[in-house]
């Protein structure tokens, strides 16, 4: 039971959304990327090269707990050989298409119903997530009808800081107008999400992980969440109606 929690913040990837490898969807995005960049390379080959460069960028982002602006992501990391004055203005659209080239993101089973019910039970809701791109999530929130339910949306792509930096959690709590100690976080990463949530002083940490992943994980005092769940719907067992 979580009697003192007023706000529930939710991660996106592998928590509220999952990635589906839709080849037709991915192919359209790859074709759009090569069109925008202005290359005649094969879309599959070109995007495979982007994937390798993105791994280098990700390593930098993890080490520095930072997220580069979209223009810098493309001109410095992904296509530095192309004219920066042409590429930089395309950064937002290129990032959006690059994300689509990875697959199609869909809401987990029961996700919308759980979000609606948590709000009905009296919780302020928010999102805290690491991802590149500033366009995708605002568009998605509107398209899926989630926009009215999330008072606070803290994205590394917008703030420039990544989990587990406690600053991104604290900014989310500030946007929601709730003290950190009265906030809960729902994530999927036993290392990153535990460290960040604890450092920010959040009151409750819930980790959603499959039984198979949990069986292979090592739980220690450093990465132990308050609650472990396997399905998103189980959040309704954790957060009762507030008085």
Image (tube, rainbow, N blue to C red):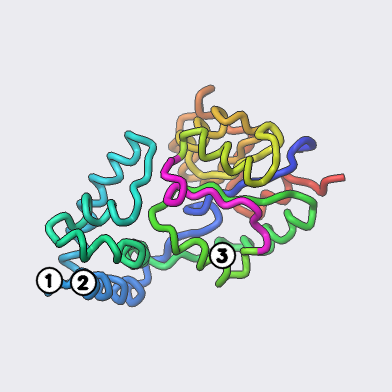
Q: How many marks?
A: 3
Q: Decide if residue 23 is on the left or right side of residue 15.
A: left
Q: Secondary structure at mark 3?
A: helix
Asked if the stretch drawn in magenta spans residue 155, the answer is yes
Q: Quadrant of the N terminus?
A: top right
* Above or below, 225 relative to 212: above
Q: Which residue lies at the image location 77% right of the left edge and 35% below the top edge?
A: 4
**Relative image position of residue 217 (x, y in whole percent):** 45, 35
Residue with the mark numbered 1: 41
Q: Which residues are magenta?
A: 148-162
Question: Looking at this rendering, what residue extends furthest in the front direction?
Answer: 85
Q: Which residue lies at the image location 57% right of the left edge and 31% below the top edge?
A: 200
Q: Secondary structure at mark 2?
A: helix
Residue with the mark numbered 2: 34
* Above or below, 171 relative to 26: above
Residues at circles 2 and 1 in contact by the CB criterion of under 8 Å: yes
Residue 112 is tagged as none
């Amino acid at each position: 039971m979580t009697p003192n929690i007023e706000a529930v913040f939710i991660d996106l990837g592998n928590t509220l959304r999952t990635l589906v490898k839709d080849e037709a969807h991915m192919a359209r995005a790859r074709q759009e990327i090569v069109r925008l960049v202005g290359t005649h390379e094969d879309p599959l080959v070109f995007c495979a090269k982007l994937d390798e460069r993105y791994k280098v960028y990700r390593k930098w982002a993890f080490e520095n707990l930072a997220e580069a602006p979209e223009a810098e992501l493309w001109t410095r990391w992904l296509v530095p050989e192309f004219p920066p004055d042409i590429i930089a203005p395309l950064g937002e659209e290129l990032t959006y298409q690059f994300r689509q080239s990875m697959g199609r993101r869909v809401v987990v089973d029961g996700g919308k119903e759980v979000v609606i019910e948590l709000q009905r039970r009296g919780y302020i809701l928010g999102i805290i997530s690491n991802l590149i791109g500033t366009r995708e999530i605002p568009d998605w929130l509107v398209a899926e009808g989630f926009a009215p339910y999330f008072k606070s949306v803290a994205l590394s792509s917008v703030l420039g800081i990544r989990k587990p930096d406690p600053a991104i959690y604290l900014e989310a709590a500030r946007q929601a107008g709730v003290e950190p100690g009265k906030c809960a976080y729902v994530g999927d990463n036993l290392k990153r999400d535990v460290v960040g949530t604890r450092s920010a002083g959040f009151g409750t940490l819930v980790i959603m992980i499959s039984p198979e992943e949990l069986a292979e994980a090592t739980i220690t005092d450093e990465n132990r969440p308050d609650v472990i769940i396997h399905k998103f719907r189980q959040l309704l067992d954790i957060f009762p109606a507030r008085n």
